[in-house]
Amino acid sequence: MSEKAADCRTMAEIRDNIDRIDRALMDLFAERWTFIGRAAEIKAELGLKADIPARVDEVRNNARENALARGLDGDFYDGLWAQLIRHSIEHEEKTLGR
């Protein structure tokens, strides 16, 4: 299987690669989630809130800059990360009992 879009000659190759990338993204999201869980544990120990606005801004800015650096739509990925962060905060709040 080709791993570069330009090398693909059929839609089946395109679809196989998109599916491969989607699985890899899910692996990365699953790994990220382990850190969200650990963050909630550490925040509980330190008496911190789940929602730390300065960190939320930092993560969203990082997402936007990383997207732009790769020629992607910064607004789209900022919005996607906003959802990801909101979901993470909700999980942390449940873990923290708030």
Image (cartoon, helix red, strand yellow):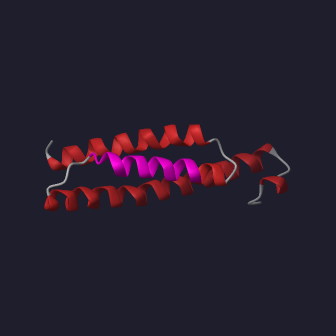
82 sits left or right of 52 in the view = right
Q: Nearer the viewer, residue 67 or 5?
A: 67
Residue 8, given in percent of the width and then of the height, sits at 82, 53
Residue at 84% of width from left, 57% of height from top?
Answer: 7
* The stretch drawn in magenta includes residue 9: no
Q: Give the vertical position of 79 relative to 37 (above or below).
A: above
Residue at 41% of width from left, 58% of height from top?
Answer: 32
Magenta stretch bounds: 51-65
Outermost residue on the front side: it is 54
Task: Work out which quarter of the rendered image holds the C terminus and state it.
Answer: top left
Task: Work out which quarter of the rendered image holds the N terminus and state it.
Answer: bottom right
Q: Give the vertical position of 82 relative to 17 (above or below).
A: above
Residue 27, given in percent of the width and then of the height, sits at 48, 58
Main SS of the magenta segment?
Answer: helix
* The stretch drawn in magenta includes residue 59: yes
Residue at 20% of width from left, 49% of height from top?
Answer: 49
63 sits left or right of 96 in the view = right
Residue 61, given in percent of the width and then of the height, sits at 49, 49
**How many numbered marks are there?**
0
Residue at 14% of width from left, 62% of height from top?
Answer: 45
